[in-house]
Image: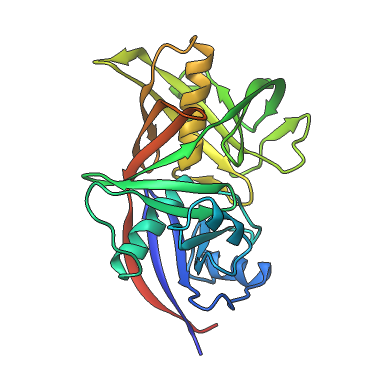
Amino acid sequence: MGLQFTKGHGTGNDFVLLLDKVGQLDLSEAEIRKICNRNFGIGADGLIIARPTKGSEVASLLTEEPAAQWFMDYRNQDGTKAEMCGNGIRVFARYLLENQLISFESGSTLPIATRAGIKDLTQTATGFAVDLGAWKISEEEVLVRSYGLKVARPGLHVNLGNPHVVVALADLQELEQLDLNRTPELEPAQPAGANVEFVVPSEPLIDQGVASLTMRVHERGVGETLSCGTGVAAAAIAIRHWAGGIQNNWRVLVPGGELAVKMFAAEDGEHVAISGNAELTFTGTWEN
């Protein structure tokens, strides 16, 4: 019997979504790679399995938030498990809503269980906003070598539940010359790998109270993608850190569109949220 799937994207970062109401769908890494293959499969940057939180690997999160009834089981394009996906979780919320798996009143908050903990979403005019929670910056310098860069550049390690290394470039021309089909080299190597964001701050940095930057990203286990939700948050955090913490509202331009980033105070420290579109594009049956 074939797998019923839905395809969706957030700013061009695309996903295959599957529903597993009984928690028994067991896909191998090889099967996930085949589904996500753009030549021989459905094609996607990643695969999301919607599972009930109860009975899943993150069932303990229900003690923290009993309303988090759904677990976003996210897999990278290469089949490996990932902690979180900022674009994927917005598309996941759209999928749950349109398939009537949740009721989501305007102004209410939707908690979703992930391997990076509970993430809260709210609806916006164009899609969803997700509170990614607190983050950590490591002052340990990471050198990044990438095809198209003449010399290695320093990167800032930002952890948002998943690992990122952010590299500032001189201008948009330097950004365009990067070849991100090949994986950037990190020194020291990161044991769990990392998403690598290359960013160029706008000139001027702040316009009408909003700071902006342009970004390209190489996602671990995938390659270059048109967007990365947690990556745009990491990029804004890094630029703000280098600039002395001068701005909390950001606009990040990626090849797939635009996302908004906001830093704000919370009980357990400063949080970061992103907002942007989330669209479902088609459904089908995977028979292979």
Whether residue 43 is situated above or below residue 125 in the rendered picture: below
Q: Tell whether 32 sits left or right of 107.
A: right
At a point 43% along the width and 56% down the height, the residue shown is 14
Q: Which image quadrant for residue 246?
A: top left
Q: Tell whether 123 sits left or right of 77.
A: left
At a point 49% along the width and 19% down the height, the residue shown is 239
Instruction: Give the x, y percent position of residue 207.
Output: 27, 15
Instruction: Give the x, y percent position of residue 218.
Output: 57, 41
Q: Could you tell me which quadrant the C terminus lies in?
A: bottom right
Colour scheme of the rendered structure: rainbow
Q: Is residue 170 visible?
A: no
Tell which of 187 and 266 is nearer to you.
266
Whether residue 243 is situated above or below residue 9 in the rendered picture: above
At a point 60% along the width and 66% down the height, the residue shown is 56
The total of numbered circles placed on residues is 0
Instruction: Give the x, y percent position of residue 252.
Output: 38, 30
Whether residue 72 is situated above or below residue 130 in the rendered picture: below
Q: Is residue 141 visible?
A: yes
Instruction: Give the x, y percent position of residue 39.
Output: 52, 67
Tell which of 64 and 25 is nearer to you.
64
At a point 59% along the width and 70% down the height, the residue shown is 55
Q: Which image quadrant for residue 282?
A: bottom left
Tell which of 116 and 205 is nearer to you.
116
Whether residue 43 is situated above or below residue 237 in the rendered picture: below
Tell which of 197 and 56 is nearer to you.
56
